[in-house]
Amino acid sequence: MQLVNKKIHFVGIKGIGLSTVAQFCFRAGAKVTGSDNQENFPADSVLNRLKIPCHSFSSKNITSQLDLVVYSSAYNQNHPEIKKAVRLKIPLKSYGEILAEIFNQGKHKIVVAGSHGKTTTTALLGHLLDKVGCQPTVFVGGLSNNWQNNFKKGKNEWLVAEGDEYQKKFLFLKPDYLLITNIDFDHPDCFKDKKEYRQAFEALKKQTKKKIFSGQKISPVFKKFLETMDFPLLGEKNKENAYLVYRLAKELKIPDKKIKTAFETFKGVKRRMEFYLNHKLSVPSSIIVDDYAHHPEEIKATLSALKEKYPDYKLLAIFQPHTFSRTKSLMADFGKCFQKADFVYLLPTFASARESGSRNSTLLRNKSLTNGQGGRVFTTREQKPKENMDKLLLKEVKKHHPKAKFLPSFKNFKLMTSDVINLKLIILTLGAGDVYKLAEGLAKKTPGNLS
C-alpha cells in the first residue's frame, strides 16, 4: 500500500479506531487531514501531538486534489463530505477496509477480539511484543498508558490489531493468531440475536491461519507465575485475559522471564479501572475510579475487582447507560449487575454517535453505500425508542437495589446520600460515554467538598 505523499482525508478522525489508521498513514508519509466535531475526544492529544489538522465537518474539506477519503462507518451517505467525495469520484474506504489493507500485508498478524477486555488485552500484548524486541505495529481501541497513544508504529512485520465485532468490521482482517477474550451478546442494534453475534466470531475463527486462543480459567501453572510478580491489573477477568497473552507468548517461544518483565511494567489503558486519586495511600477517605464498562458483564467484573481489592470500602457506582438498544435488550441483566455496589446512581442514557441525527440511525439494516471504488458504509438499527429507557432501567435496578437513584445530570454533582460522607468510599463512574468527566471533576476536589 503506497502512502508516501498521498493526500488522505479522514471523516470522523477523532474516532478511537480511525485515529490509529490516520496515524499509520501519517507516519508512512501520507499528507493527512481530518474532520470531526469540535468536542474533546481521547484521540485529540495524539492528533495534536502529530499536528494533524482536524477541521469541522464541511463539504469544503473535500477537494479534487485528494487521493482517498477514509470514513468512520458511523456516518452515512448523507454526510456532506461523503456526498461530495462520491460526486467527485474520489476513492472511498471505510475504517475497516483500510485497516485490513494495512494489517493483512503483515508477516505476523495477531487479532484480539471479544465482547469485553479486548482493549486492555491488545495493549498488553503489544507492550509484551515491544519489550521482547519484535517492534510491533499496534492498533488499540484505547489509549495505552505506556505509550500515551492508541497506536504504536513498528516495522510492520508484527502487526497487532484490536478486532471490533461491531458491524462485523473484524471480518476484514485475516489473522495468523486470534485471541478471543469472551463472547457475550452485545450490539443489538446490528446483530438480531445471540446466534448471529456468535456466528460473526465463528467466521473470524475460520479465516485465522495458524492458532486460536480462547478465553478460559487460568491454569495452576499461570497462577503460580502471577504469584512471582506484582501484577498491575485488578480482577479475575484481567488475569484470564493476561493468560491468553501468556499462552500466545509461550507459543512464540518467549521465555517466562521476559513475559514477567512485560507484565510488571504494563501500565494499563485509559478509562479501564483508571484511578483518579492516589489509591496507594494506606487509608484514603475516598478513591475515585473511572471505567469504560457499559455491558452488565463488564460492570459485574469491575465491581468484583474493586471489592476484592478494597473489602473495607463502600462502593458508590455511577452508571451512564450507552445506547438505548443495549439497555432495552439487556434490561434484566443490567438490573442485577450492581449487586456488589453499596450505592447506585443512574444517569441519562448517553446518545451514541449512531443515535444522533447526523449519523446512520435512519438507514435500513444491511444497506450499504458504494461508489464503485470499494467504499462501503455499514449500518445499524439504533433508534431512540418511544419508551423511557432511563425510567424503565431505574425500575429494574430497584428490584435488586431498592435505594438506587436517578441523577438528571452529572453537572454540579452532589452526593445524594448524606451518610456516605464519612465512609471510606470508592466513587466509581461507569460507561462508554462522557461520564469520565465527572471522575475528572471530582478528582479536583477534596473529599470534604463532595457533598
Image (cartoon, rainbow, N blue to C red):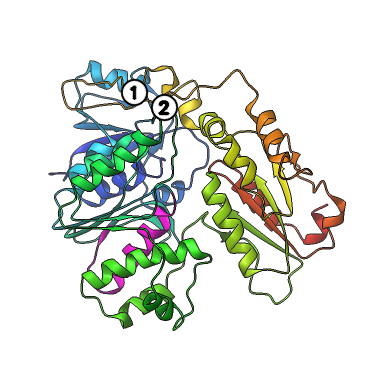
Q: Nearer the viewer, residue 333 or 123?
A: 333
CA distance separating discs 1 and 2: 7 Å
Helix, strand or loop at disc 1? helix
Q: Which residue, given by chain and number where applicable, does mark 1 sit on?
A: 81
The picture places residue 4, in percent across and down from the top left corner, at 16, 46
* Residue depicted at x 67% and y 56%: 340
Task: Classify the position of the N terminus by image quarter.
Answer: top left
In this rendered view, identify the residue nearer to me: 21 or 50: 21
Local packing at callout 2 (Cα closer than 10 Å; few below 14, some 14-19, many 20+) is some
Whole-percent x and y of residue 446? 77, 61
- Residue range of the region highlighted in magenta in the rendering: 116-137
165, above or below 374, in the image: below
**Disc sitting over residue 47 in the figure:** none
Mark before the other along the chain sequence, 1 or 2? 2
Identity of the amino acid at label 1?
Glu
The reply to whether dot 1 and dot 2 touch (C-beta < 8 Å) is yes
Tell me the residue that label 2 is attached to.
57
